[in-house]
Image (cartoon, rainbow, N blue to C red):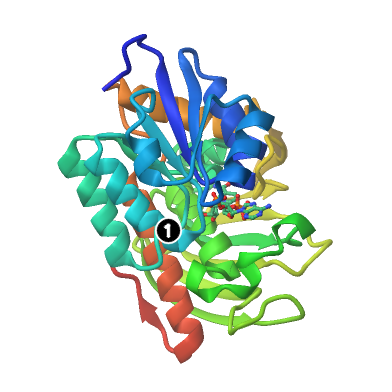
Amino acid sequence: MQNQTQRTGWGLIGASTIASEHMIGAIRAQAGHDVAAVMSSSIERGRAYAEKHGIAAAYGSVAELLSDSAVDAVYISTTNELHLEQALAAAAAGKHVLCEKPLALSVLQAQQMVEACHAAGVVMATNHHLRNAATHRKIRELIQNGAIGKPLFARVFHAVHLPPHLQGWRLDKPEAGGGVILDITVHDTDTLRFVLDAEPLEVVGLSQTAEMAKGGLEDGVMAIIRFDNGVLAQLHDAFTVKHAGTGIEIHGEQGSIIGRNVMTQQPVGEVILRNAAGEQKVQVEHENLYVRGVASFCAAMRGEGSPAATGDDGIRSLATAVAVLQACTTGQKTPVNP
Ligand code: NDP
């Protein structure tokens, strides 16, 4: 499915901020890969975006982008309600699909997307960047090597301030999948699944609407997830908090791992191991999270291994976020399905 020059061309579905800030660079960092085209619902904006980023073609519809033979793979980063139909169209056109989180607005929709890609024989992945961080990979390795014994509890600190240039649909468009739970809780969940190598079973939660979100959306949440290895994980996610700092902690029978400033898009942060031997800062070799994630997707397109976060990972993180949303609405403990 590669184009004739054997270069792999990507089509951007959505002239988005995340593509301009991280993903165009991450694609171009891969040898033999480039961004061939961009699709925007506004062709004027699409052309301006293409010119700004040196992209050869701009289209005003997904169908036009998918019929461009220079496009072998698509990166979908539109608002969340559009991912489903765009992923289905890309799969039907035989293009590989790297899709943003949350994959869709419901678990059923996400399953449809993954099944369509599987049936079409194209690679499908979810852009959960955090599992590509050197810090989280180190935390997973420490746990697997028994550094803290049996893990019992986890705490995720992901209360941040949504920057002004992103204060749009996330805060006032429920129909676009706005709100902090579909935006941030999905990332926490994927990260916890990755570091713990365990699956969420059930959740409780309470959400908050402070001065930012409208239209019934939440801009803060505290939730607890029970995992199938017995771990209880506490999450604190918000758009409204300027000075909390981010982090993750895993507490086990024999020790604790503390990750500071690690719930971020940047290759930064530190990992501390505390156990009977005392406290030590663990060495990590930072690297660009998005470049690493795209590299695994490119390898999967060549038939080498799986993407860092698969479509199934996207389904599971979404299922947990949907359960948290439901728990916050009903006040009930809610099972995670699937
Ligand atoms: P943006 O608001 O920047 O982009 C979403 C859509 O909004 C675009 O597809 C575009 O539509 C439209 N848009 C963007 N800028 C403008 C503008 N100036 N004027 C008019 N319309 C505009 O969203 P994000 O980039 O923040 O998020 C996009 C997706 O990526 C979401 O699914 C989000 O959850 C995910 N995301 C993932 C991150 C990660 O680290 N994995 C980080 C941030 C976001 P059109 O293309 O039709 O022009």
| Lateral position of residue 198 relative to residue 108, left or right | right
Residue ID at (59%, 79%): 217
Please identify the quadrant where the N terminus is shown.
top left
The vertical placement of 213 against 229, above or below, is: below
Residue 58 location in percent, x, y? 52, 35
Q: Residue at x 42, y 23 (%)?
A: 9
Asked if disc 1 is less than 8 Å from ligand 1, the answer is yes
Residue 42, placed above or below residue 237: above
Q: Identify which amino acid the numbered label 1 is placed on.
A: Leu
Q: Secondary structure at mark 1?
A: helix
Circle 1 packing at 10 Å, graded few (<14), some (14-19), many (20+), is some
Examine the image and state in which quarter residue 242 appears: bottom right
Q: Residue 88, percent across and down?
A: 28, 50
The outermost residue toward the top is 5
220 relative to 211 in the view: left or right: left
Residue 268 position, x and y percent, is 71, 37
Q: Residue at x 45, y 90 (%)?
A: 330
Q: Which residue is mark 1?
A: 82
Q: Position of residue 188 (x, y in %)?
A: 54, 57
Q: Residue at x 71, y 63 (%)?
A: 167
Name the quadrant containing residue 163.
Answer: bottom right
